[in-house]
Image (cartoon, rainbow, N blue to C red):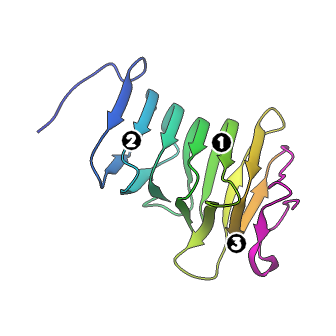
């Protein structure tokens, strides 16, 4: 079934254990807040560069993909990842974060952040106005691009020294 909402001002909450969000458009699509609530789920976000999300909070595992790997994956102002979960970005793509990337695990339950499916790298792009707030993150094959200070945090792990432009 289909539903129509003023998504620019709405807070969309997905409770399903597994969510597949497909935001593809030739024109701009704007969303206020999206919350993937289920902590036991695996979500996939298929976003092209026309998808603008003010705030995206993910409380379970998630993957970011794009049909066209030459495009950026969305324009997300604030992205919040949750401790104890895994987040992957399709290799060869750029996940664009405009304001804040928050990924704070802890010593008992770190966050995993990696490129998939193979050994190639994926990128996170943040401008000099953007902020990276991370610690206790196990990272693999992620390139930091843009003017932000890409500091993964003093307790994060640079798996196989595979990350580029990040400070650990």
Q: Residue at x 88, y 59 (%)?
A: 167
Q: Which mark is residue 89?
A: none
Q: Is residue 152 magenta?
A: yes
Q: Is residue 162 magenta?
A: yes
Residue 108: quarter of image? bottom right
Q: Residue at x 77, y 68 (%)?
A: 157
Percent from the top left, x then y, of residue 6?
33, 19
Q: Which residue in the protein does label 1 denote?
A: 97
Do the numbered discs 2 and 3 sit on residues whose CB atoms are within 8 Å? no
Percent from the top left, x then y, of residue 109?
61, 60
Label 2 residue SS: loop
Label 3 residue SS: loop
Mark 2 and mark 3: Cα distance apart in space: 27 Å
Sequence-first tag of 2 and 1: 2
Q: Residues within 10 Å of mark 3 (few under 14, many from 20)?
A: many
Q: Residues within 10 Å of mark 1 (few under 14, many from 20)?
A: many
**Quadrant of the frame with the C terminus:** bottom right
Mark 2 and mark 1: Cα distance apart in space: 20 Å
Who is closer to the viewer here, 128 or 105? Answer: 105
Q: Main secondary structure of the magenta part?
A: loop
**Span highlighted in magenta in the image:** 147-168
Marks 2, 3: nearer the viewer: 2
Q: Which residue in the protein does label 2 denote?
A: 37
Q: Is residue 87 above or below residue 54?
A: below
Q: Residue at x 11, y 39 (%)?
A: 1
Q: Is residue 129 above or below residue 64?
A: above
Residue 29: quarter of image? top left
- Compared across the picture, whether 121 is left or right of 5 comes to right
Residue 133: quarter of image? top right
Q: Residues within 10 Å of mark 2 (few under 14, many from 20)?
A: some
Q: Which mark is residue 141?
A: 3
Percent from the top left, x then y, of residue 74?
53, 44
């Amino acid at each position: 079934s289909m539903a129509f909402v003023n998504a620019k001002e709405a807070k969309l909450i997905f409770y399903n254990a597994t969510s597949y969000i497909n935001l593809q458009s030739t024109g701009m699509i704007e969303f206020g807040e999206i919350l993937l609530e289920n902590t036991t789920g695996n979500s996939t976000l298929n976003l092209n560069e026309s998808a603008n999300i003010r705030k995206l909070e993910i409380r379970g595992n998630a993957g970011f993909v794009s049909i066209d790997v030459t495009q950026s994956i969305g324009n997300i102002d604030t992205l919040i990842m949750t401790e104890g979960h895994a987040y992957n970005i399709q290799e060869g793509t750029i996940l664009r974060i405009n304001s804040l990337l928050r990924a704070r695990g802890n010593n008992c339950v770190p966050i995993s952040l990696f490129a998939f499916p193979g050994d190639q790298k994926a990128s996170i792009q943040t401008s000099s106005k953007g902020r990276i707030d991370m610690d206790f993150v196990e990272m693999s094959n992620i390139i930091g691009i843009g003017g932000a200070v890409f500091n993964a945090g003093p307790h994060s792990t640079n798996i196989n020294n595979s990350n580029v432009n990040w400070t650990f």
